[in-house]
Amino acid sequence: MELPYYPINDFEPLMKGMVIGGMGIFHVFLAQFAIGGGIVMCYFQWLAHTNRSPLARRFLDSYFNALVLISFVVGALTGVGMWFTTIQTSPRTIGMMVDEFHWVWATEWTFFCVEVVAGYAFYRYAAQLTDRSRMRLLVIYSLAAWFSLFWINGILSWQLTPGRWAEGGSVWAGFFNPSFWPSLFYRTAASMTIASLVACIVINTIPDLDREERRHLISRAGRLLLPMVFMPVLGVWYLAVIPADSRSWVLGGSAAMTMFMLLAVGASLLIGLYALIGLLGQRLYINGATATLLAVLAFAASAGGEFVREGVRKPYTIRETLYSNSLTQADVERLRRVGSVTDDPYPLRDAQAYPNNQLQLGAKVFRFQCNICHTMSGANGLTHLTGSWLVDQMRMNIAKLQHTKPFMPPFAGTPEELEALVQLLKWVSGGRPNQWPVSDDPKVFADLRRWLDEAGTAPGIAAAMAAKDRKKGD
Amino acid sequence: MDRVFPFGFPFPTAFYLTLYVVTLVIHVVFMNYVLAGGGYLAVGSFLGSRRDANNATGDATSILRDWMPFAVSATITAGVAPLLFLQILYQRDFYSANLLLFHRWMSIVPVLIVGFYLSYLYKGRTIGHRSAVWRTVIGVVAFACYFFTAYSWTENHLLSQRRDIWPVFYASERMMYFTPSLWLRLGLWVSGSVATMVTIVSWQLWFARRHGGDVREGEARRAATLALCGIGVSVACAAAYTAALGDGVFKVVTGALGAPYLVAAMVGLAVQAAVWIAQRRSQEFRGGFLAFASAGALLSIIGMTVVREAIRLAGTDVATLYPQHAADLSVGGLPVFLAFFAINAVVVGLCFRLVHRGRLKAGGGA
């Protein structure tokens, strides 16, 4: 297949991952609120029409308004925003996902339609409906919302654990992949947690409720935190089924990944403990501020979890298929011969800023291969990451990139392009002087070619894991 | 391109083109309601500030104010499916236009969020019913948000078809693409949305009247006049836009591929015009008239949507896309989609039935 070249934008000083991560975390949090919110409302509707809680109906009206105003508006639009942001970050990745799973997405869309119709029917007419009709509408809404999670979960989990799909299996082999079920159940529990905590906030905003009435409603909402007890088991299940190298990143292999994992676990643990002691044991009263703080902790847990989910895919965006720089292994092999930017039709926007053609070539290589995850001097900036490397060290480290850092993809270009990138990094680190010599020593190019050949085009994670196993054996 | 759309293309391409057009038509119906309805509310809030608009019922303003949030939600949801099939059909073109327009394009997300919330504010009693000034500001800003989104989509659509200028456009860092035909094309779609919106609102007023609600005197006449104005302007924009098309594109649109749909669109417009002229003479909305107006509007939307696609196809080397479309159709999942489409269509029907019967049983009226 022809390699598509896209007009790549620079987000500096932000890295693209921060933009899509920020949008993604926000969207996931709101979407999970919508999913759990449906379950919370079904429960309270049941309490209302079985006369188990005379206050449940008042809560329902307030809660549903919050759900509509937050989830239906921002949740829905950030969903579209996710699509657009992913296109900005990695058009080839989202393109491949759409090509492979468009019928799954189309199926999810039919559930969106049900969600919107059932939700708005309840929003507009709930006050005029019988309890039985209200309950049925809410059940339809909840099922539709949960099924939207079901479908998107298959696509997202496939990115990390494509399972038998990677061996030529069907789309369903990819959909029902090894991490599908633990991820689905975990997200369901997370959804109920978020919705329950938001319920506690809403209860504190309902006027004319006395403290005992609030305590009663909070206690009921707190019961929906119960699925949290399964989260540790589901988390362990998830870790057990993801690839060993991905697991190693979160278990100490990568400081950032481990830290975010601990953030997710720690925040969840705090919420769980508070739920256990305060809400289920009814020993603590939860006011609006505390409820908000717990919801913020849930947001932090979601943020940590999503960061880990995105991060552990490295060096891929689609495991065993597409490297994180949107290239396949076959692309890398070809681009090592013909050059990665030889056919790139897009000029540099600041070509005149570079003193020579070699630096311009380096800038195009940086844009094509590195810019998706790195900036030049901003967040995750290459000049910071490589600042202490000597020039020969830099040449070899980049030529053998996937072995230098196993979560990096292999360099996908010719020795000339690699040398151009090295010169660019040195030029930027050197303060962008007006004059810069062209590096054209044949021995350098010969060394680079040899190192590239030695490194190969396969990912470095297998070699890294083998080395780790050998170390354990010793 | 020598056969009627979508025939003449290999099956996978024809299949995705059909799905794209069908789902886009659904999206356009809701979009027309939001775009023209937003404009109506903006103008109405300004002009209506002299009368007691706060308590007005039984007119287009009250209907639109009440239903706009749902309509925005429905428009966005209905837009997901054509957005999906667009990525199958013209992936590289669409993605490239997205990237070239960068922040400008991405800004439609926060802008729509603002428009969405303003539609809730407009509907609510806190601001929307209290102050004429605030109501005007909210109405105008909300419409500006919807219009900006429409403008951006037009811009994106046109840029996506200009592969020849992408590198130069990228180098220029402009993030705004303008071509003289942009305003004509946008004018055609915006003015064309008026008649659709009027038809739907008229049905809502007709339905309200049928169930004992009041309809403001002269509303049917006003609606007909508005629809006729919309049709008139859209015909003028269509003529100017057609004149601006290049010879090659014009031949495709008026050739076998697009001609039947162009004729359908014109017939649809003629039917609508005739119906609204007749309706204008009547004091109240008539179901028969509205049925014909709906059929005419649908015919126009289908016709214009296919003509829009024919223009794009005329400028695209579509044969290069055939292998990818065939590969996409070979992936599994279509039967599952069709099954859930049918099931969920029934469930949506069930929701309507639940509301209808639930209200009857609860004594809330039909």
Image (cartoon, coloured by chain):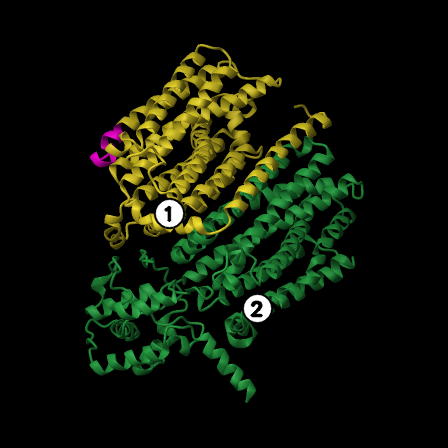
Label 2, residues with CA under 10 Å away: few <14, some 14-19, many ≥20: many
In which quadrant of the rendered view does residue B179 lie? top left
The chain carrying label 1 is: B
Q: Is residue B48 visible?
A: no
| Residue drawn at point x = 38 percent, y = 46 percent | B89
Q: Position of residue B229 (x, y in %)?
A: 37, 21
In which quadrant of the rendered view does residue B11 lie? top left
Chain that is green in the image: A
Q: Position of residue B176 (x, y in %)?
A: 30, 46
Q: Amino acid at mark 1?
A: Trp
Disc 1: which residue:
B105
| Residue drawn at point x = 45 percent, y = 55 percent | A97
Chain that is yellow in the image: B
B356 above or below B310? Answer: above
| Residue drawn at point x = 69 percent, y = 62 percent | A230
Query: Overall secondary structure of the magenta stretch?
Result: helix
